[in-house]
Image (spheres, rainbow, N blue to C red):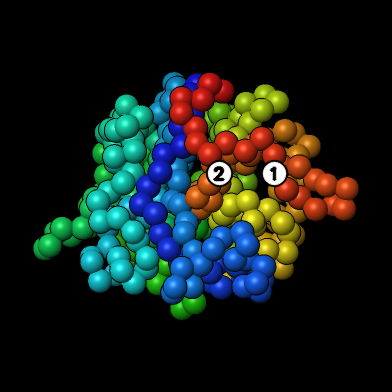
Amino acid sequence: MRLWSILGNSQKLDGGAMFGNVPKAMWQKWLPADEQNRVALACRALLADDLDGRTVLFETGIGAFFEPKLRERYGVVEDRHVLLDSLAAAGFAHEDIDVVVLSHLHFDHAGGLLAAWAPGQPPRLLFPNARYLVGRRAFARARQPHPRDRASFIPELPELLERSGRLELVDNEHSSTLGKSVRFSFSDGHTPGLMLAEIVIPGDGVVFCADLIPGRPWVHLPVTMGYDRAPELLIDEKRAFLDDKLARGVRLFFTHDVGCALARVVRGDQGRYGTADELPALVALAA
């Protein structure tokens, strides 16, 4: 099996929203803000080739589905579908993907499922040969969002996924499609039913941290986002998650960290979690 980090469209969001109750004087040391108080964020996917005989893409980033006005509003930097370019650079087309795994259906994680915006064209799915795996509770949230996070979803997406006939809703540790090769766990602090996918490699697994831990600054337990629905719950979930990955030697894959794709979790003398052995990108990494 080989692993690639696949960059999608990048995004700029308000730093205060990304760091919750952390003062700007502290978070701007981790991520500098521009003149609009926005910080740069990656939307990085993980590609696993020959994962139990399949080519599997974990998430799709934000994509290019927004019309120009909304692209500007939500800080999407590029107007082309960067994910498709990045897949091509790794030697793959979206038609080559057998499985797409989605932690949840917020647009910055699932928008890359859709073709780039074009005038007068309705949203349409890419990855025509893939099974789409989504947590059952995350899918239910996308169909009936709360007013607080309604703007984070793509209204047409749940129906498109259902109509494809290739949707699997996951609510257990393993899915029918991927079997024992990928282990799933679930979190509710960011959004109900966030699905965390771990590629099972004895003694050296890789877990897609999604929005439980968007990047290295959020490894520190007290750091949460303003977008999290239940920050205290998220911190408790994060502690249990990091303890487990530390004990088993599972590496962390970050979707929103512009400078780091993969790292090992460590814990210092004062009990603070951090990272080591950081890799900025994965290019056909043997696993």
Outermost residue to the right = 269
In the rendered structure, the answer to whether residue 244 lies left or right of residue 171 reads right
Which amino acid type is shown beneath numbered disc 1? Thr
Residue in the image at 40% along x and 72% along y: 151
- Which residue occupies the foreground of this view, 186 or 120? 120
Apparent side of residue 117 relative to residue 147 in the rendered image (left or right): left
Q: Is residue 260 above or below residue 211?
A: above
Residue at 50% x, 36% y: name it.
281
Residue in view at x 57 percent, y 36 percent: 279
Q: Say if residue 103 shows up in the picture.
A: no
Q: CA distance from mark 1 to mark 2?
A: 10 Å
Instruction: Inspect the image, locate mark 2, and give the three-letter code of the amino acid beneath it.
Output: Cys
Residue 126: percent from the left, percent from the top?
Answer: 26, 44
Whether residue 235 is visible, yes or no, is: yes
Q: Secondary structure at mark 1?
A: strand
User: Looking at the picture, does residue 224 appear above or below residue 266?
Assistant: below
Query: In terms of depth relative to the viewer, which is nearer, 5 or 58?
Result: 5
Q: Quadrant of residue 68?
A: bottom left
Q: Name the residue carrying label 1.
A: 275
Q: Which quadrant is home to the C terminus?
A: top right
Q: Residue furthest left?
A: 120
In the rendered structure, are the residues bearing label 1 and label 2 in contact, judged by CB atoms less than 8 Å apart?
yes
SS for dot 2: loop
Q: Position of residue 30 (x, y in %)?
A: 61, 59
Q: Which residue ends up furthest to the bottom in the rendered image?
A: 147
Report x, y in % for residue 57.
Answer: 42, 37
> In the rendered view, does 180 fall on the left or right side of 106?
right
From the viewer's side, name the closer residue of 166 and 108.
108
Left or right of 79 on screen, residue 273: right
User: On the image, numbered disc 2 is attached to which residue?
Assistant: 260
